[in-house]
Amino acid sequence: MPLASRAKIFMPFAALRGFEELIEKKKLEIEKSREIKTEDAPQ
């Protein structure tokens, strides 16, 4: 088996396409809502 073909076997595989982006988007939404809540909190 050629080395290039063999390397393809070990390439990362994303079973759920777009999942990482969705998680990052949700994380940013949560952080933004936390910032808003802390700004509105009485001191």
Image (cartoon, helix red, strand yellow):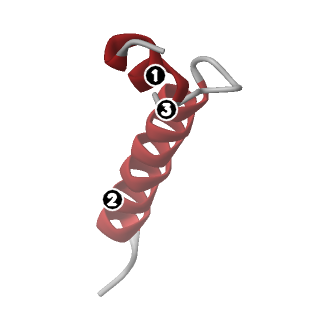
State the residue at coordinates (43%, 61%): 34
Q: Which mark is residue 6?
A: 1
SS of the residue at dot 3? loop
Q: Which mark is residue 35?
A: 2
Q: Is residue 11 placed above or below 42 in the rendered structure?
A: above
Asked if residue 20 is positioned above or below residue 18 in the image, the reply reads below
Disc 3 crowd, CA 10 A, few/some/many (<14, 14-19, 20+) = few
Of the two numbered discs 3 and 2 on the same chain, state the one appearing first in sequence.
3
* Residue type marked 3: Pro
Please tell me which of labels 1 and 2 falls first in the chain. 1
**Helix, strand or loop status at disc 1:** helix
Q: Earlier in the sequence, mark 3 or mark 1?
A: 1
In the visual, does 3 lie left or right of 1?
left
Judged from the image, the secondary structure of the residue bearing numbered disc 2 is helix
Identity of the residue drawn at 58% across and 27% down: 13
Q: Residue furthest bottom?
A: 43
Amino acid at circle 1: Arg
Amino acid type at circle 2 is Glu
Which mark, by number, is residue 12? Answer: 3
Q: Position of residue 15 (x, y in %)?
A: 70, 26
- How much space separates mark 3 and mark 2, taking CA atoms? 35 Å
Q: How many marks?
A: 3
Instruction: Pick whichever, 11 or 39, lies toward us.
Output: 11
